[in-house]
C-alpha cells in the first residue's frame, strides 16, 4: 500500500545575522543553512496496518506526513501510495488519503461544522447517498449531534479533533495520516479518539499512520512501531519485541520465609526480614527455581516495564 525508498528531504533556511548592515548584506546575498529533515527513509506498509511513527521533537515526523500527503516534494527517493506518487499525482492521491493535524484544524474556522462537511462533499465530489450514509454514521460514532451546527471556533479541542477526524474520513480514504491527534486532549477525549481510530481501521481496513508522543496511544492503538531520530529510521518492528528488548530488566517483589541468598540470576535491590525487591537477570522461571531452594515464597508480584521506560531506553540507545 505505502512504499518509500530512500526518501530524503532537506530544508534550506536563510541564516539571519543581527544588525542593520548584516541585514542589508543578507538582502543582496543570502546565506543558507541546510537541515536534513529526512535521510534515506525506506518503509513499506501494508493495507490495513496501523503504524505508530514516533521520535523526539524535530525528528522528521511531520515532514514525513507532509511528504506522504503530497504537501511537500521529497528531494530524493521514490514514494508510491496505492500506486500513485503523492506529489506529482496529487489530485488523484488526495482522494485516497485523509490527513489530520492535531495542532491545527483543516476545517473552516467560522463555519458551522456541518457546512465544512458540505464543502468537503463538493471538493471530493462525494456522491450524495454515500455522503449521507457516512455523515450519519460519523455523527453517531463521533458523537457530533450537539456540535455539528456550531462554528469550529466555538468548539473545545476534543470536539474539534473529533470533527477533524470525521472530516478526513468522509470521502472514504484508504489511508489516514494522523499527526499528533491526541495532543493537548484530556484523558476522556484521548480515550474516545483512540476508540474511533481503532473502529475505523477494523471496519474499513483503513491504513493508519499515527505520530504521537503519547505512549498510551502507541500501546492501545498500534502493533508496529517505526522510530525516527534526526531524520533517520532507527527501528521498525513489533511493539512487543521492542518492549522485550528495550524494556530494561524485569523486577519482582516477594514476601518470603527463610534466608534470601545472593545469586547471579538476580540482583537484590531491597530486602527486609520478609520482603524483597529483585531485578531479574536471567528469566523469571529460572529465578523462582533458584529462590525456592532457600526460601518459601508467600507472595510474588511481577513488574513489567512500562512503554515509557521502553521509549526512554530507546531514545538513549540511539542517542536521539
Ligand atoms: P517532528 O514532526 O518530528 O517534530 P519535523 O518534521 O517538524 O519534526 O522537523 C524536522 C526538522 O526539520 C526539524 O529540524 C525542523 O526544525 C525542520 N523543519 C521542519 N519544517 C521546516 C520548514 N518548513 N523549514 C525549515 N525547517 C523545517
Ligand atoms: Mg511534528
Image (tube, rainbow, N blue to C red):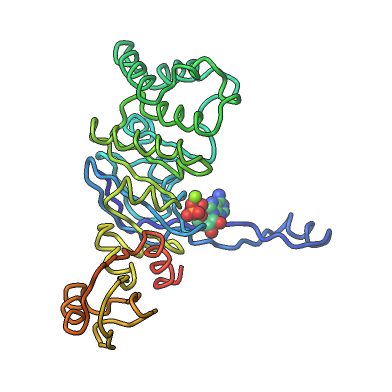
Asked if residue 165 shows in the view, the reply is yes
Q: Residue drawn at (78%, 62%), measured in percent from left and top?
A: 18
**Left or right: 145 in relation to 42:** right
Q: Is residue 110 left or right of residue 217?
A: right
Q: Judge whether 249 appears above or below 259 on screen.
A: above
Q: Which of these two is toward me, 235 or 255?
A: 255
Residue positioned 28% across, 40% down in the render: 207
Residue 229 lies in what quarter of the image? Answer: bottom left
Image quarter hosting the N terminus: top left
**Quarter of the rendering containing residue 134:** top left
Q: Residue 27: percent from the left, percent from the top? A: 74, 54
Q: Residue at x 34, y 55 (%)?
A: 77
> Residue at image x 32%, y 45%?
221
- How many marks the image carries: the answer is 0
Residue 11 visible within the image: no
Q: Give the percent coordinates (x, y) of residue 105.
A: 52, 33
Looking at the image, residue 195 lies above or below residue 172:
below
Would you say 151 lies left or right of 92 here?
right
Q: Residue furthest top?
A: 129
Residue 227, image x and y in percent?
Answer: 37, 59
Is 20 in front, or is 128? 128
Residue 220: image location, x then y, percent: 33, 47
111 or 7, which is in the foreground?
111
Amino acid at each position: 500500500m505505502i512504499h518509500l525508498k530512500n526518501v530524503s528531504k532537506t530544508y534550506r533556511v536563510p541564516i539571519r545575522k543581527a544588525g542593520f548592515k548584516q541585514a542589508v548584506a543578507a538582502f543582496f546575498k543570502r546565506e543558507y543553512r541546510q537541515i536534513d529533515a529526512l535521510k534515506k527513509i525506506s518503509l513499506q506498509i501494508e493495507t490495513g496496518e496501523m503504524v505508530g511513527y514516533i521520535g523526539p521533537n524535530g525528528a522528521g515526523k511531520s515532514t514525513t506526513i507532509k511528504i506522504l500527503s503530497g504537501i511537500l516534494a521529497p528531494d530524493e527517493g521514490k514514494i508510491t501510495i496505492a500506486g500513485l506518487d503523492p506529489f506529482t499525482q496529487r489530485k488523484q492521491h488526495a482522494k485516497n488519503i485523509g490527513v489530520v493535524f492535531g495542532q491545527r484544524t483543516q476545517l473552516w474556522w467560522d463555519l458551522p461544522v456541518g457546512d465544512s462537511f458540505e464543502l468537503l462533499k463538493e471538493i471530493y465530489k462525494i456522491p450524495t447517498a454515500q455522503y449521507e450514509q457516512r455523515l450519519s454514521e460519523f455523527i453517531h460514532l463521533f458523537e457530533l449531534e450537539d456540535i455539528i451546527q456550531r462554528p469550529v471556533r466555538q468548539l473545545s479541542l476534543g470536539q474539534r479533533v473529533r470533527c477533524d477526524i470525521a472530516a478526513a474520513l468522509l470521502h472514504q480514504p484508504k489511508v489516514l495520516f494522523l499527526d499528533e491527534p491526541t495532543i493537548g486532549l484530556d484523558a476522556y477525549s484521548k480515550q474516545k479518539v483512540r476508540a474511533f481510530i481503532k473502529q475505523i481501521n477494523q471496519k474499513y481496513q483503513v491504513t493508519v499512520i499515527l505520530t504521537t508522543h503519547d505512549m498510551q496511544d502507541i500501546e492501545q492503538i498500534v502493533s508496529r512501531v517505526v522510530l525516527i531520530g534526526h531524520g533517520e529510521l532507527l527501528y521498525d518492528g513489533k511493539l512487543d519485541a521492542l518492549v522485550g528488548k528495550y524494556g530494561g530488566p524485569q523486577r519482582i517483589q516477594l514476601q518470603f520465609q527463610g534466608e534470601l541468598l545472593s545469586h547471579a540470576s538476580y540482583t537484590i535491590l531491597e530486602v527486609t526480614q520478609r520482603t524483597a525487591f529483585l531485578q531479574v537477570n536471567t528469566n523469571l522461571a529460572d529465578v523462582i527455581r533458584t529462590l525456592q531452594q532457600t526460601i518459601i515464597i508467600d507472595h510474588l508480584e511481577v513488574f513489567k516495564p512500562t512503554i515509557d521506560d521502553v521509549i526512554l531506553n530507546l531514545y538513549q540507545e540511539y542517542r536521539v
